[in-house]
Image: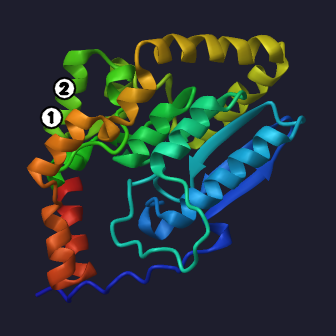
Amino acid sequence: MSSPQQPIEIPPPSLDDVLYEKRDGWALITLNRPVVLNAINWSILRRLKVALDQGEADPEVKALVLTGAGRAFSAGGDIQSTPPPDDEPTPSGFDINMRIWRMPKPVIAAVRGYAVGQGHELAGICDMTIAAEDAVFGELQIRHGFGPPVLITPFLVGPKQAKEILMMGERINAQDALRLGLVNRVVPNDDLLAVAEDVAKKLGALPQGTVRSNKLLVNRAYELAGFQEALNYRQDPFFAALLEQKGEMDPHLRVLREQGWEAFRQSRDALYNE
């Protein structure tokens, strides 16, 4: 008979939840909560905004690489997160996605392990996404009974593929992500950051005005097609009324409230092992 699994000790919020490292002409931003697979909480949202602001303000930084510490890019939103202990403003996930979208400098996602839920969307909003061979993508929220926080997927793939991703909630391996258009390249795990660095340096060596205007051109084309309104679909009166009528509630949250974090974790993790 196996011994009961020990509860995971979750580190408290820290200024180091997002790391910023200036390199030679580019900057590396690392989501740094590896114990919880870089689950996104208020601390990460705050620190990530600061890091993005820092990268944009530095004229020596021509491109940014966004990655995750440990064995995952991000396993999505941190459902166990408690509210911040102060009244300082905290950007939403939508705010961070739009911050990357509006960033004049290119942002490259370097993904290893899980990039699911909000992690999937964060990688998707970046200008380019490079995946390690072990990367796993997916909009798994439907397994919990609710929709995507930020509706990026239909703009990355065709409508039929978007419906399959959003309606079935299946995991997507790196090669399928490449086929679907979720990522630009798939590389060996050990080469991930080296390839991301190479892309960042190549972008930095090109005429910066043209790099930035070309990003703007592509973004503007999507904005004219309703990109921003679609991403923030929960603010649309029709969908707001629909979601209120539906009473969106994650059944796993009930487990969390009634039985505690460890029971919730086991229930949630079972989804990733299917």
Q: Amino acid at mark 2?
A: Lys
Q: Residue at x 17, y 55 (%)?
A: 144
Q: CA distance from mark 2 to mark 1?
A: 6 Å
Q: Are marks 2 and 1 in contact (CB under 8 Å)?
A: yes
Q: Is residue 191 left or right of residue 179?
A: right
The image shows residue 223 at horizontal and vertical percentages of: 49, 18
Q: Which image quarter: residue 265?
A: bottom left
Secondary element type, mark 2: helix
Q: Residue at x 34, y 18 (%)?
A: 179
The image shows residue 194 at horizontal and vertical percentages of: 68, 36
**Which residue in the protein does label 1 denote?**
167
Q: Is residue 44 left or right of residue 243?
A: right
**Which residue in the protein does label 2 denote?**
163
> Could you tell me which quadrant the N terminus lies in?
bottom left
For label 1, count other residues whose C-alpha is less than 10 Å away and answer few (under 14), some (14-19) or many (20+): some
The image shows residue 26 at horizontal and vertical percentages of: 79, 37
Q: Is residue 238 above or below residue 262?
A: above
